[in-house]
Image: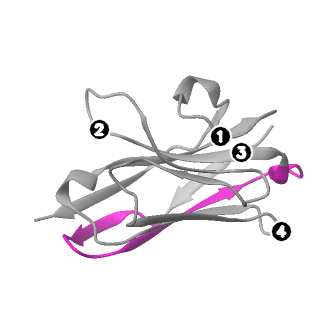
Amino acid sequence: QVSLVESGGGLVQAGGSLRLSCAASGRTFSSYAMGWFRQTPGNERELVAGISRNGISTYYGDSVKGRFTVSRDNAKNMVYLQMTSLKPEDTAVYLCAARAGGDFVTTAARYAYWGQGTQVTVSA
């Protein structure tokens, strides 16, 4: 089992940058594939970035490719999302999620563990 806590959200102007962090508890963090999702009111959670257990493989949604970078530090039980060139449409609650027993997938329902989320607001 793993507990996740996100931080780093906030208000930023369009074109700006933010770095989100997700701190994980537990001794087996390296056994979890990790995903960063975002959600806006009335919409389903959307996978914006995923990273494999060893950090070698990554995935990015089309809307964030070239702007967002996901990374992890298994020694520190941390996963990060560096967001650059932010746009107003990036405004959402960002959540990190952990999936055991396999690699990252795009379906939110296949992640067993979730953080509480951090709000990112991008002003025009």
Of marks 1 and 3, which one's residue comes earlier in the chain?
A: 3
- Residue 99 lies, with reference to residue 71, above or below; the image says above
* Residue named by callout 3: 33
Circle 3 Cα neighbour tier, 10 Å, few/some/many (<14 / 14–19 / ≥20): many
* Residue named by callout 4: 75
Circle 4 Cα neighbour tier, 10 Å, few/some/many (<14 / 14–19 / ≥20): few
* Residue named by callout 2: 40
Distance Cα–Cα, label 1 vs label 4: 20 Å
21 falls in the magenta region: yes
Residue depth check, mark 1 versus mark 4: number of the one nearer the observer: 1
- Residue 60 lies, with reference to residue 46, above or below; the image says below
Residue depth check, mark 1 versus mark 2: number of the one nearer the observer: 1
The single residue placed furthest to the right in the displayed view is 27
Contact, mark 1 vs mark 3 (Cβ under 8 Å): yes
Distance Cα–Cα, label 1 vs label 3: 5 Å
Q: Which mark is residue 104?
A: 1
Of marks 4 and 3, which one's residue comes earlier in the chain?
A: 3
Of marks 1 and 2, which one's residue comes earlier in the chain?
A: 2
The single residue placed furthest to the top in the displayed view is 109
What type is the residue that disc 4 sits on? Ala
Distance Cα–Cα, label 2 vs label 3: 23 Å
Which quarter of the rendered picture does the N terminus lie within?
top right
- Which structural element holds mark 2? loop
Span highlighted in magenta in the image: 8-30
